[in-house]
């Protein structure tokens, strides 16, 4: 009996060791693969726990990445949430991988993102080719180009004015939440005519914490953070579906917005189902409110800690008003283009922000880089923030110093500044975001005195978060 027991244990150990070796040293067609150095951690969880340990109050990239670059070099392997991953902090490799979108790699995000955004199936919004071209085109059509100059700038200024006016009548305002709501309402209005004042749609409670929820385990059962997030996503999708229904019922009432274009294109683009349009609208809202609110919150934190920067920012924006015939007239595109210090404050914030530790792709085929193989099916994390913190380009890289942007030339920036990603997947909302943030800062510093009253701590766990928020108090300069 004991003998049989020992044989079973021995077989189990041999099988487990076999799985472990297969896990740690994969082969392609029976030939061992030359993987980058690194550790695959424990089966199933890999090194996930190490990545999730928060780093407090340092704007540097997460220590998980920093330490492994020091130990293994800029390309290393790991395993996160059960997925084998090659992490690249090598700018040359990153550029190559970006150029291979749709050939050797495709966009891939976490399982929680995949579930939330319906990333699977034929018309997944991460698809390449026609669907991708459509996604870019429709976003740029409504959030870019001429539309920005002609139509959006006055709308942005008006919405910022009314929101900041409200904030100034309240006590302290937690800016991450308040800006998330402001940008959500604005984007939803532009995209599908959502009118927050008169809408009967349910409130989206988890809005300010959406990205945090996405880092949770994708377990969609009541009581979990992920479940709450999925519920709120459902509310947003229902809101879009309801508006779509109203538009189908009243074809004469068409404002010609993002949703109208999508409805009109349903006849020519087969993938444009009602479900897909709801996904698309939700994707745009998410891309907008999460990233713009984090950038502006971080900018306010930096400004409150660097009064000399706030002084120069205020001086530049007040000079814009002084040059006008009517100081109460609206911000123009030409004025926006002259606000170079404001743009430097935004760039410097984007350089240090780096919300996720890197951008994710999936290898569609075996890829050979720098003598290593990235096996097909593996995830690739492109640590784009590494170039933002290179001391050869940015002296004292962890310092918030908007003046440095005066001396940075376009050629350097094309290689060393990529907050909006790279290659064909570069952010389609970049110009809109920069304009929105500049208009926000313009209204804030010309019309209000403000100070931080609470919060301001940051963590990377591994995404950038504000655990106690950033609370500011505004008073009108006219009071
Ligand atoms: C500070 C603000 C923003 C930042 C830092 C940012 C950053 C990024 C990054 C890094 C990517 C590339 C993702 C990847 O390659 O995996 C991206 C893609 C994208 N962003 Fe943004 N984003 C911002 C605001 C916005 C806004 C306001 C919108 C919409 C109005 C938007 C729409 C998109 C879209 C549609 C894509 C996908 C583009 C494609 O696949 O071709 N983003 N963004």
Image (cartoon, rainbow, N blue to C red):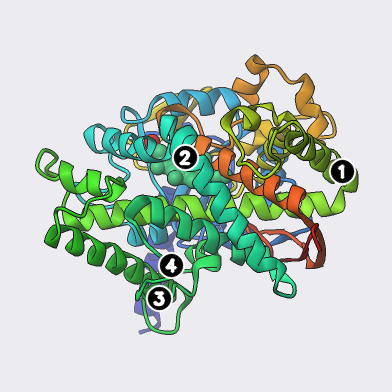
Of tags 4 and 2, the one toward the viewer is 4
Of tags 1 and 3, the one toward the viewer is 1
Relative image position of residue 207 (x, y in whole percent): 50, 67
Q: In this view, does 423 lie above or below 297?
A: above
**How far is disc 2 from disc 3 in space, using C-alphas?**
28 Å
For label 4, the crowd category at 10 Å Cα-Cα, with few meaning under 14, some 14 to 19 and many 20 or more, is some
Of tags 2 and 3, the one toward the viewer is 2
**How far is disc 3 from disc 4 in space, using C-alphas?**
24 Å
Query: Residue at left 38%, top 61%?
Result: 15
In depth, the one of 371 and 74 nearer the eye is 74
Q: Does the residue labelled 1 lie within 8 Å of ligand 1?
A: no
Query: Residue at left 42%, top 30%?
Result: 146
Q: In this view, does 416 lie above or below 389?
A: above
For label 1, the crowd category at 10 Å Cα-Cα, with few meaning under 14, some 14 to 19 and many 20 or more, is few
**How far is disc 4 from disc 2 in space, using C-alphas?**
22 Å
Of tags 3 and 4, the one toward the viewer is 4
Q: Does the residue labelled 2 lie within 8 Å of ligand 1?
A: yes
Q: What element carries label 1?
A: helix
Disc 1 or 3, which lies upstream in sequence? 3
Disc 4 or 2, which lies upstream in sequence? 4
Pointer 3 residue: 227
């Amino acid at each position: 009996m004991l003998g049989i027991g020992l044989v079973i244990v021995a077989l189990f150990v041999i099988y487990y060791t076999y799985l472990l070796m297969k896990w740690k040293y994969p082969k392609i067609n029976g030939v061992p693969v030359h993987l980058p150095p690194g550790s695959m951690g424990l089966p199933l969880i890999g090194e996930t726990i190490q990545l999730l340990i928060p780093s407090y109050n340092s704007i540097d990239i997460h220590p998980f990445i920093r330490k492994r670059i020091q130990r293994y070099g800029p390309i290393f392997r790991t395993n996160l949430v059960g997925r084998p991953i090659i992490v690249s902090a090598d700018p040359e490799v990153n550029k190559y991988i970006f150029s291979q979108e749709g050939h050797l790699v495709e966009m891939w995000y976490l399982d929680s993102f995949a579930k939330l955004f319906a990333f699977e199936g034929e018309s997944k919004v991460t698809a390449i080719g026609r669907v991708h071209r459509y996604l870019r085109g429709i976003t740029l059509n409504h959030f870019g180009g001429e539309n920005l100059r002609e139509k959006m700038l006055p709308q942005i200024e008006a919405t910022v004015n009314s929101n900041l006016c409200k904030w100034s009548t309240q006590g302290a305002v937690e800016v991450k939440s308040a800006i998330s709501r402001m940008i959500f309402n604005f984007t939803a209005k532009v995209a599908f005519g959502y009118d927050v004042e008169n809408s009967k749609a349910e409130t989206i409670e988890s809005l300010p914490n959406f990205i945090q929820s996405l880092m949770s385990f994708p377990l969609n059962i009541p009581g979990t953070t992920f479940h709450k997030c999925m519920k709120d996503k459902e509310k947003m999708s229902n809101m879009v579906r309801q508006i779509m229904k109203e538009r189908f019922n009243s074809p004469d009432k068409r404002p010609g917005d993002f949703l109208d274009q999508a409805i009109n294109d349903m006849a020519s683009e087969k993938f444009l189902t009602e479900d897909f349009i709801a996904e698309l609208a939700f994707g745009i809202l998410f891309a907008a409110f999460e990233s713009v609110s984090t950038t502006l919150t971080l900018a306010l934190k930096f400004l409150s800690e660097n009064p000399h920067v706030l002084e120069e920012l205020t001086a530049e924006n007040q000079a814009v008003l002084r040059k006008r015939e009517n100081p109460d007239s609206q911000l123009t595109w030409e004025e926006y283009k002259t606000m170079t210090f404001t743009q430097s404050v935004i760039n410097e914030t984007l350089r240090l922000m780096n919300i996720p530790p890197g951008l994710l792709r999936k290898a569609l085929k075996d890829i050979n880089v720098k003598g290593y193989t990235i096996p097909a099916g593996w995830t690739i994390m492109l640590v784009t923030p590494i170039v933002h913190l290179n001391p050869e380009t940015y002296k004292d890289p962890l310092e918030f110093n908007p003046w440095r942007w005066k001396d940075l030339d376009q050629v350097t920036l094309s290689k060393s500044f990529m907050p909006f990603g790279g290659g064909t997947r570069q952010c389609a909302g970049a110009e809109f975001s920069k304009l929105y943030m500049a208009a926000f800062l313009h209204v804030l510093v010309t019309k209000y005195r403000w100070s931080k009253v609470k919060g301001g701590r940051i963590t990377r766990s591994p995404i950038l978060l504000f655990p106690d928020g950033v609370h500011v108090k505004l008073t009108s300069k006219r009071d």
